[in-house]
Amino acid sequence: MTTHVETPSVQAATPAQSPTAMPSMTKRLRLLPSRRTSLVLTTQLVIIVGFLVLWEVAANQGWVNPLFVSKPSEVWSALTDYLTSEQMRSSMGATLIAVIQSFVIGSVAGVLIGCVLGTNPFLDRVFGPFLVPLNAVPRIALAPLFVAWFGLTGTSKVVMGVSIVFFLLVENSRSAVKGVDRDQMTMARVVGLNKRQLMTKVILPSAVPTIFAGLRLAITYAILGVIASEMIAAKNGLGQDIVRYSSEFQINYVFAVLIVLAALATVASVGSSRFERRLLRWQD
């Protein structure tokens, strides 16, 4: 005869959570990213200050030759003097105009042609092989040629910038369009979308994030192209200021112009990133 013995089930006791436990935990989790950001910013500030102090001490103690590397105190004086000068306003205006024109012309043409090549297999097979060798040509080697063609004018600087931005965005847009999900393309054709609807409702919405990443990079390359052209031959511009101050061994002013250029590139990059986030808010 078998006897069944029933044993009471034992449940693990869970501690009762107080009503304030969850809000407190949430608050602590929210504070973690801000603390990490503060730590990162503090570390970056310490690195910058330490570098500047070491640079100043090295120049004052004769560890490095101030004639070639200057020192932070002299660079600061040169920067304040340069920022308030008429030379800076004239050079900044000339460079900004060339950069904006280079970016607008190169980006519009590059995106349009890249999208056409990405959606047209025949044209892509015809012109695609030419893109690699043309893009591989160093643009700095073409600068003297542009000067010979267009002279010491703003046109030569703009053409130099366009030659960089255009090929960058052609390849970027072409790859973005060709990378659209094929299942989406097939489904769009099944439901009866024509070519214009396919471009506006499927291809562009999928390719826009990649294209904007290329545009953000193109702004920096437009600045680099214009500055390189100005350094080779130009009447005015920030690149020409660098060459002139270098030839006069005014290294502190060279660093001042470089700081202005770094600030210009940073503002352009941050501005394009914010514009991209606003425009692509529909993806969130």
Image (tube, grey):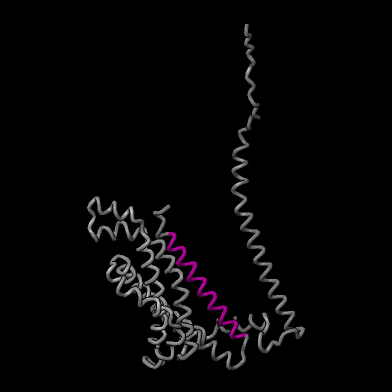
Q: Residue at x 50, y 85 (%)?
A: 239
The residue sitting at the right extreme is: 61
Q: Residue at x 54, y 78 (%)?
A: 260
Of 93 and 214, nearer the camera is 214
Q: Eyeballing the image, is 242 above or below 1?
A: below
Q: Of helix, strand and loop, which mostly describes the magenta segment?
A: helix
Q: Is residue 284 left or right of residue 7?
A: left
Q: Is residue 175 left or right of residue 220?
A: left
* Rendered location of residue 234, percent (x, y): 45, 90
The residue sitting at the front extreme is: 1
Q: Is residue 56 left or right of residue 25?
A: right
Q: Quadrant of the N terminus?
A: top right
* Rendered location of residue 46, percent (x, y): 69, 67
Q: Is residue 272 magenta?
A: yes
Stretch of the chain drawn in magenta? 252-277
Q: Within the image, what quadrant is residue 8 found in?
A: top right
Q: Within the image, what quadrant is residue 146 found in?
A: bottom left
Q: Is residue 86 visible?
A: no
Q: How many marks?
A: 0
* Rendered location of residue 247, percent (x, y): 58, 93
Q: Eyeballing the image, is 263 above or below 138?
A: above
Q: Is residue 24 magenta?
A: no
Q: Is residue 110 left or right of residue 61?
A: left
Q: Residue at x 33, y 53 (%)?
A: 183
